Image: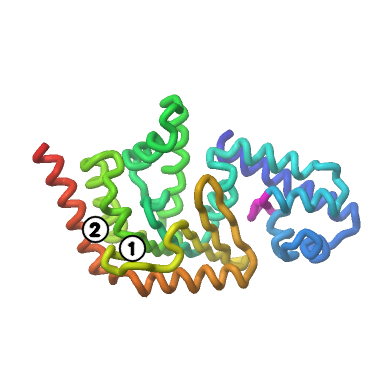
Amino acid sequence: MARGSRQDAWEFFGAELKRRREVAGVTQGELGRRVFVSGGYIGQFEQAIRKPQLDVAQRIDEVLQTDGFFERLCRKLIDKSPYASYFAAAAELERVTTEMCEFAPTLVPGVLQTESYARAIMRASNPFTPEESIDAKVSARLERAEILKGPSRPPLWVVMHETVLRTPAGGPAVMAEQLEHLTAAMTDRKALVQVIPFAAGAYPEMSSTLKLMWFSDAPPTAYTEAWYSGVLLDDPSMVRRATASYDLMRATALSPEASRDLIESTAKDFRQCTTTT
């Protein structure tokens, strides 16, 4: 399903939500309270600005007594997404974020991956998947980088562990290209990258990725991902805690200048490996 048709389908979801809510005589604020989101979120669902998670769609069905309509539609749209079901909602939010911060403990964040690096990761994660399916997954990941193009791109701040730089995903040539891509993104002011070195020792939230997103017309959101699962956090107190953890990681990391030097030197090491083998 193309991006345009997916958006059309979400707009249909929103229009039906508004129609059925109004038929039931329920305000956005009342529905929001009863499904544990804000009334503003309900308005954004209706305008297809934000996409509800499956559990929210299920609660909407319960409140509006719509016999599973919104759950079924939400499941179908999630299944049609090129992204894993647990990441689909976060991927949609990336498209409308006004600022984004990421923490990466083991891999380069998806929006900064090169094609070769993304393909190496996909192949390692899906060793029995046909190549055409790998191609589709890689294309979907590269499409996410579109948010960094153009004058309206959101500021992107990335903190990654040195593990990301040292793990030769795809081999030395692929890693050299990937790290050079990172420094190019820094040069072009598409991203500000900091590295937590091995010498820093322990640091907050050591095992999970973290993505913080801000919006012009909605509260910030945090997304964290672990083993084949992800959680989108809208609760303000949880977002504040996640932001505080991210701030601690930024404080633990090298400065942007020192991080760039480390990334460049590591890229040179990988590049030298390709010329001596």
- Give yes or no for residue 52 being in the magenta stretch: yes
What amino acid is at disc 2?
Ile
Residue 81, image x and y in percent? 58, 39
Find numbered disc 2 in the image and state the secondary structure of the residue it sits on: helix
Whether residue 208 sits left or right of residue 186 in the image: it is right
Residue 71, image x and y in percent? 75, 43
Q: Is residue 90 depicted above or below 3 in this figure?
A: below
Q: Is residue 261 depicted above or below 114 in this figure?
A: below
Whether residue 195 sits left or right of residue 261 in the image: it is right
C-alpha span from label 2 to label 1: 10 Å
Residue located beneath label 1 in the image = 193
What amino acid is at disc 1?
Val
Q: Residue at x 52, y 68 (%)?
A: 242
Point out the image quarter for the C terminus.
top left
Bin the neighbour count of mark 2 within 10 Å (Cα to Cα): few under 14, some 14-19, many 20 and up: many
Q: Quadrant of residue 273?
A: top left
The image's colour scheme reads rainbow
- Give yes or no for residue 166 being in the magenta stretch: no
Find numbered disc 1 in the image and state the secondary structure of the residue it sits on: strand
Q: Residue at x 55, y 42 (%)?
A: 84
Q: Residue at x 42, y 62 (%)?
A: 206
- Residue range highlighted in magenta: 47-53
| In front of the other: 126 or 74 | 126
Which SS type dominates the magenta stretch?
loop
Q: Which mark is residue 263?
A: 2
Residue 111, image x and y in percent? 41, 51
Q: Is residue 198 depicted above or below 226 in this figure?
A: below
Contact, CB < 8 Å: mark 2 with mark 1?
yes
